[in-house]
Amino acid sequence: MPQQGILIVVSGPSGTGKGTVCRELLRSNSHLKYSISATTRSPRAGEVDGINYLFVAKDQFRKMIDNDDLLEWAEVYGNFYGTPRHYVLEQLHKGYDVVLEIDTQGAMKVKEKFPEGVYIYIIPPSLDELANRIYKRGTDSIDVIKKRLQCASGELSLAQNYHYIVMNDQVAAAVQKVEIIIAAEKLRAERNTALIDNLYSAGCVVNEVPTL
């Protein structure tokens, strides 16, 4: 039976580039699986249903809540987002590490259920750079952009609830830092008790004491 996978939760204010970091991370690490969130918001240009998000109607989303089909869910900027439960648990059981890219509300709900997960908060080099990134993205109205910037400062104060903080000044460097975090987490003693148990169960017979 494979070792249980690790749940990796990635959050950060809108515009930090956390989505880009996650995509690059998944592209170069085959042991990672991405958990697609369900959402009631409309697709942005280039987004594909079932790849970027599961785009559902609000009535369908409410049914998912009622049926306990979501690991977490939250309302963000007037739209609902949630993490389908079955896929995450199935992949973890198979031994894959699962990446969740979700907002801070959802992350804290997941942390209550999965305290053994790895929680990573992505920050921008500066708030000015964050504003530039959101404006250049060009996918939101001016009103929505202003709301995102207003929320960013408050969201940054929640970073202390995460295990790690990674600055995304250069995508490649940020991805490398996340890979280092995952590698270190794989070696934590509490995740490897089975290795010690196997050493004991295998036994040891010493026929001759080596000469020093």
Image (cartoon, rainbow, N blue to C red):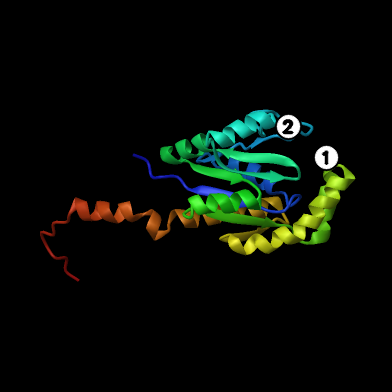
**What amino acid type is highlighted by mark number 2?**
Glu
**What amino acid type is highlighted by mark number 1?**
Thr
The percent position of residue 9, horizontal first and vertical second, equals 57, 50
CA gap, disc 1 to disc 2? 11 Å
Q: Is residue 71 left or right of residue 192?
A: right
The percent position of residue 10, horizontal first and vertical second, equals 61, 50
Q: Quadrant of the N terminus?
A: top left
Q: Is residue 63 above or below residue 22?
A: above
| Residue displayed at 71% across by 45% down | 76
How many other residues sit within 10 Å of disc 1, few (<14), some (14-19) or many (≥20)?
few
What residue did someone put label 1 on? 139
Residue, far bottom: 212
In the rendered image, is residue 130 in sight? no
> Dot 2: what SS?
loop
Q: Quadrant of the C terminus?
A: bottom left
Which badge, 1 or 2, comes first in the chain's sequence?
Answer: 2
| Residue displayed at 76% across by 50% down | 15
Mark drawn on residue 47: 2
| Residue displayed at 61% across by 48% down | 106
Mark drawn on residue 2: none
In the rendered image, is residue 16 in sight? yes
| Residue displayed at 64% across by 61% down | 159
